[in-house]
Image (cartoon, coloured by chain):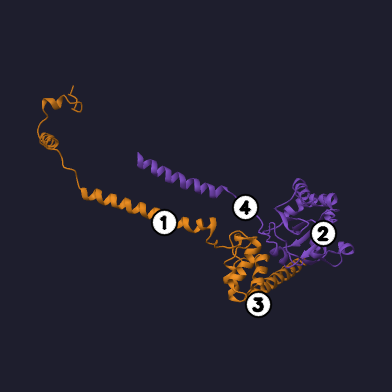
C-alpha cells in the first residue's frame, strides 16, 4: 500500500517533466515568425518520411526552423534561405522540385497525362455520338418478310414442317 | 476482343503500379551528397573528456588541414551505429597515423552520459566531439545517422557513405584517400 503513492508520485513527476519539455518545445515554436513555417513547409525534413520542416517535431527540423528564424532576422529573403539549404542537401530538400532539367518531367508529365486522357475522352464521346446519329440500320425486305411470316405462323396451329422441327413436343405415348 | 485487351492492359498497368508502391519498401535515403568534390564545412566543437589531453577542449577542423579525414556522424540511440562502431575503431587502429578519424555525436541534445557510454563501450581511440544543436549535421547535409564522410587531404569530399560502414567499405575508401 505504501508503494502505491510513491509510484503515483513518480508518475506525476514524469508527467510533469514531459509536460514541461512539451511546453518548452511549443513555446519555442510560438516565438517563431509565421514566415518560418511558410518557408519550412517548402523544405523536406531530412530525417522524417514525407513531412516538411514546418510540420515535423524532429530535433533536426526544430533546429532548421531556428536557422530559418535567424536568417530572417538577418534580413535574408525566402529565396536566399531556400538556397542555403539547397546548397547543403541538393534539390532533394525542396518539396516542390525546381522546374529545370530532368525534374521538369515531374511538372510536365501530369499535364501530359491529363491532355492525353482528355483527348481520349473527346474521341470516345465523338465516336459514341456518331454511332447514335447513324441510327438503326435498315432491314432487308427479305428478312422482314421472314419475320412477319414467323409471327403470323405463331398464332396458327403447327404445320407439318413445324412438327418435324427439333423443338416440337414429343407425341404422347 | 480488342476492347477486352485494352481494359486488361489498363487494369494490369494499374495493378503493377500499386504493387510497386506496396512492395518497394522505405524510400531510398542514399542520395548523393551535394558536397561531393567540394570543400567540406569547417567546424569547431567540444571534445569528450577522454580526448582532452590529445586535442584540448575543442576540436577545430581547420587545425587539421592537409590530412585526409574520415568523419563519422553517430547517435547513442542509433542501432546501426553500434553495428559499425567496431569496424571504425579497427580502421582507426590501422590507418590512424595517416588519416584523422573524427566521431561526431549529433541529433541528440544533452546526451553526454549516453555518449560517454557509447564511446567507452567501443573504446574509441579517435576523437569524438559533440554537435549538440545539430548545426554541423545540417552543414554537412546529413539525412540521418550513421553517415560517414571521406575527405581528401585538400579538404574536398571524396565520398559519403549512408548507413553503417564495414571494414570492406572503410578499407576501399580510406585507401583511395592515401597518396
The shade of chain A is: orange
Q: Are marks 1 and 2 in contact (CB under 8 Å)?
A: no
| Viewer-nearest residue: A123 or B150 | B150
Q: Residues within 10 Å of mark 2 (few under 14, many from 20)?
A: few
Q: Quadrant of residue B126?
A: bottom right
Q: In the rendered image of this protein, does residue A6 appear above or below residue B142?
A: below
Q: Is residue A2 left or right of residue A76?
A: right
Q: Of discs 4 and 1, which sits in the foreground?
A: 1
**Of label 2 and label 4, which has the lower sequence position?**
4
The shade of chain B is: purple
Pointer 1 and pointer 3 on the same chain: yes
Residue A145, image x, y percentages: 11, 36
**For the N terminus of chain B, which image quadrant?**
top left
Label disc, if present, on residue B28 of the rendered structure: 4
Q: Residues within 10 Å of mark 1 (few under 14, many from 20)?
A: few
| Viewer-nearest residue: B42 or B30 | B42
Chain name for mark 3: A
Q: Which residue is mark 2?
A: B117
The CA distance from mark 1 to mark 2 is: 57 Å
Residue B119, image x, y percentages: 82, 58
Q: Is residue B27 left or right of residue A114?
A: right
Amino acid at each position: 500500500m505504501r508503494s502505491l503513492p510513491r509510484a503515483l508520485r513518480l508518475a506525476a513527476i514524469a508527467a510533469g517533466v514531459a509536460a514541461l519539455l512539451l511546453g518548452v518545445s511549443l513555446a519555442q515554436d510560438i516565438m517563431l515568425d509565421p514566415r518560418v513555417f511558410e518557408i519550412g513547409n517548402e523544405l523536406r525534413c531530412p530525417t522524417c518520411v514525407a513531412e516538411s520542416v514546418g510540420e515535423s517535431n524532429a530535433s533536426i527540423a526544430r533546429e532548421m526552423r531556428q536557422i530559418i528564424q535567424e536568417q530572417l532576422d538577418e534580413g535574408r529573403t525566402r529565396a536566399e534561405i531556400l538556397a542555403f539549404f539547397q546548397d547543403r542537401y541538393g534539390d532533394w530538400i525542396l518539396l516542390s522540385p525546381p522546374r529545370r532539367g530532368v525534374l521538369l518531367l515531374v511538372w510536365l508529365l501530369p499535364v501530359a497525362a491529363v491532355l492525353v486522357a482528355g483527348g481520349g475522352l473527346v474521341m470516345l464521346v465523338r465516336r459514341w455520338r456518331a454511332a447514335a446519329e447513324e441510327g438503326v440500320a435498315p432491314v432487308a425486305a427479305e428478312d422482314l418478310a421472314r419475320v412477319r411470316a414467323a409471327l403470323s405462323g405463331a398464332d396458327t396451329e403447327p404445320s407439318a414442317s413445324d412438327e418435324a422441327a427439333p423443338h416440337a413436343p414429343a407425341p404422347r405415348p | 476482343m480488342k476492347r477486352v485487351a485494352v481494359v486488361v492492359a489498363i487494369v494490369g498497368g494499374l495493378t503493377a503500379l500499386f504493387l510497386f508502391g506496396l512492395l518497394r519498401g522505405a524510400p531510398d535515403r542514399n542520395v548523393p551528397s551535394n558536397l561531393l568534390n567540394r570543400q567540406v564545412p569547417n567546424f569547431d566543437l567540444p571534445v569528450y573528456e577522454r580526448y582532452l589531453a590529445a586535442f584540448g577542449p575543442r576540436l577545430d577542423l581547420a587545425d587539421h588541414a592537409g590530412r585526409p579525414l574520415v568523419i563519422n556522424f553517430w547517435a547513442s540511440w542509433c542501432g546501426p551505429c553500434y553495428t559499425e562502431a567496431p569496424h571504425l575503431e579497427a580502421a582507426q587502429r590501422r590507418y590512424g597515423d595517416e588519416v584523422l578519424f573524427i566521431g561526431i555525436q549529433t541529433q541528440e541534445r544533452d546526451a553526454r552520459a549516453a555518449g560517454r557510454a557509447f564511446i567507452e563501450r567501443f573504446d574509441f581511440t579517435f576523437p569524438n566531439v559533440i554537435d549538440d544543436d545539430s548545426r554541423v549535421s545540417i552543414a554537412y547535409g546529413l539525412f540521418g545517422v550513421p553517415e560517414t564522410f571521406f575527405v581528401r587531404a585538400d579538404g574536398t569530399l571524396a565520398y559519403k557513405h549512408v548507413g553503417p560502414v564495414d571494414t570492406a567499405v572503410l578499407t576501399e575508401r580510406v585507401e583511395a584517400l592515401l597518396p
